[in-house]
Amino acid sequence: MRLVCLFLVTLVLTPALLSAQANKPQVKVTAVFDGPSPVFDQFTEDLSREIRTQLSDRFEVVFVPLSFEGDWTADGVERQLDEAYSNPEISVVFGFGYLDVRAVAARKDLPKPTILPFVIEAQKQGLPRRGDVSGKRNLSYISEEPDIRDEAEWLTKVAGSKSIVLLTEDSQRDMVSTVTGASQVRLVSAAPTVEALLAAIPSNADGVIVSVMRQLSVADRVRLLDHITKRRLANIAVGPGWLDQGAMMSIRSPDNSSRRAQRAAQNLELILEGRPAAQIHVDFEERQGLLVNMQ
């Protein structure tokens, strides 16, 4: 998996770290994934950079790869969590994906500090909350509360769309269905292929909200949006990165991902400095601003 090489190179093998790491405490971390994803690859690249920036002067952070990388099943996530929590060398666990969030939420006890950087409406996913912290031993997460009605309103305002669908992969359907405003548009999902996703869009749709998709490759995103455009369907992507693949517009700021990575690295820093994970701020407010693809 790309992440393994990324963390090892970025966090361990840079010359600056090699020259100074002898005098720093070594901290071993790992990551649990729902499955392989270009979204997770990009975020872990941002996260590794932020960890280096914020922590490299005091800690040598080493990534420990797990023997199994996830296969988009609940069993696959449980297998990774069991391995991560049972490995005595690992100090902190990062978790990425909806299945991972649900699995962590369902566990009565968390043996090690666990950081979940990608959470949407935490309490709807079963995560605990006490005020502005999780309140659960060893649990830290970063949660946002998006409202899909914002995307629908812009489709109507810009393109006059009236029959709007919210498009996602089958693996994300349960999570997407809980997002505020999702019940007010037609949610459609399919297997993570261009052909299946296109077939899921009703013939009477005149607007598409491209929602959370983790499994679709970058190349397939380009193909999907190319076909959506050729069908003359107005579209808006929840993730601003989709503009690079041909989405018509997005209203969420491109710096949201890097800000989230900064927060995740800061959470790790706070934990290593002694703050209980249960007492770390959980809310994340996304910035908005209309972005239009001019290509």
Image (spheres, rainbow, N blue to C red):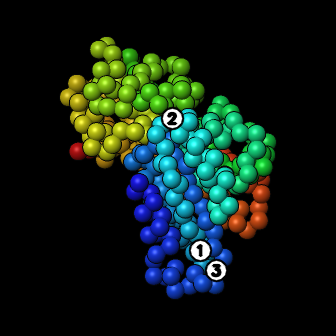
Residue 69 shown left or right of residue 218 in the figure? right
Residue 266 x/y as whole percent: 63, 62
Q: Which residue is drawn at the image coordinates 30% and 20% (left, top)? A: 199
- CA gap between label 2 and label 3 equals 38 Å
Q: Is any part of residue 110 visible from this angle?
A: yes
Would you call the spot at circle 1 few (<14 residues within 10 Å), some (14-19), or many (20 or more)? many
Q: Image quadrant for the N terminus?
A: bottom left
Q: Answer with the quarter of the image where residue 37 lies.
A: top left
Q: In which quarter of the view is residue 240 placed?
A: top left
Q: Is residue 60 above or below residue 79?
A: below
**Pointer 3: what residue?**
24
Place of residue 5 in the rendered image (x, y in percent of width and height, measured from the top left): 42, 63
Pointer 3 with pointer 1, Cβ within 8 A? yes
Q: Residue at x 60, y 61 (%)?
A: 29
Q: Residue at x 61, y 50 (%)?
A: 83
Q: Label 3 amino acid?
A: Lys
Q: Does 114 sit left or right of 225 as displayed?
A: right
Looking at the rendered structure, the secondary structure element under dot 2 is: loop
Compare residues 139 and 69 and report the one nearer the observer: 69
Q: In the image, what residue type sits under mark 2?
A: Thr
Q: Which residue is mark 1?
A: 60
Residue 73 circle label = 2
Observer-side mark, 2 or 3, equals 2
User: 290 or 276, which is in the foreground?
Assistant: 276
In the image, residue 31 sits, relative to residue 6, either above or below, namely above
Q: Earlier in the sequence, mark 1 or mark 2?
A: 1
Q: What is the spatial separation of the Cα atoms under label 3 and label 1, in whole angstroms? A: 6 Å
Task: Name the kind of residue labelled 1 in the image.
Answer: Glu
Residue 250: percent from left, percent from top: 40, 40
